[in-house]
Image (cartoon, grey):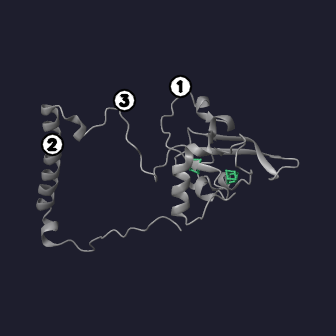
Amino acid sequence: MPGKVIKVKRHEKLGFLERLYVPMIAQALVTVSRHFFRNMWGFITGNRTTFVVQYPEQRVDYPDAFRGMPVLVQLDNGQPRCVACGLCEFACPTDCISIVPGQLEGAGIERYPEAFDIDMSRCMFCGLCEEACPEEAIVMSREVEISGFDRASLYFDKEQLLVPEHLLKRRLDFLRSEYNRPRGAR
Ligand code: SF4
Ligand code: SF4
């Protein structure tokens, strides 16, 4: 099941007061002033937690729907769950995934990614690769602290992308409930 659809109520015609714009401007000023005084009160009393997180010492717990950088699910045997089908590569709108498939002899799965690279300097964290994957092998993590001094350092290879499955449990559970999947594909 795709994500929930939220209907946004839009007025087709502006009312008299809306056409005057002044009440709307006044409403915006009230909202901005409320935030301003609340923050100022926080500064005066030292209770800054009302409006700011002291990053990086403090961190917010992102919701399960949060999309950080895409990572590969690593099975207990250390191997990626990916079967190198290429669907995520095809679905990626920025063309930042590149996969070199290899063939496994005598294993439960026939193909595996010999190489699996993502150029994080181009990735826009859209999550389409995750949606396209039939194996729950690539998922959006909570990791967003990605930086480097050049583009080459933002090129993540398979070893850098692998994350043990148990560390991705929250995201996998979220995906299974969101897409009405009973459990993992394998
Ligand atoms: S999150 Fe989007 S842009 Fe990034 S690798 Fe996946 S499909 Fe491509
Ligand atoms: S991550 Fe998923 S969609 Fe991408 S190649 Fe592997 S199995 Fe296919």
The disc labelled 3 sits on which kind of residue? Glu
Please provide percent x and percent y for residue 57.
36, 29
**Residue where numbered disc 2 is placed:** 38
Horizontal side, residue 49 vs residue 178: left or right: left
Neighbor class of circle 1 (other Cα within 10 Å; few <14, some 14-19, many 20+) is few
Tag 2 near tag 1, CB within 8 Å: no
Disc nearer the start of the sequence (2/3): 2
Please provide percent x and percent y for residue 179.
55, 64
Q: Secondary structure at mark 1?
A: loop
Please provide percent x and percent y for residue 172.
56, 53
The disc labelled 2 sits on which kind of residue? Arg
Horizontal side, residue 171 vs residue 27: left or right: right
**Residue where numbered disc 1 is placed:** 149
- Camera sees residue 126: no
Disc 3 versus disc 1: nearer the observer? 3
Mark number, residue 57: 3
Please provide percent x and percent y for residue 116.
70, 42
Q: Quadrant of residue 35?
A: top left
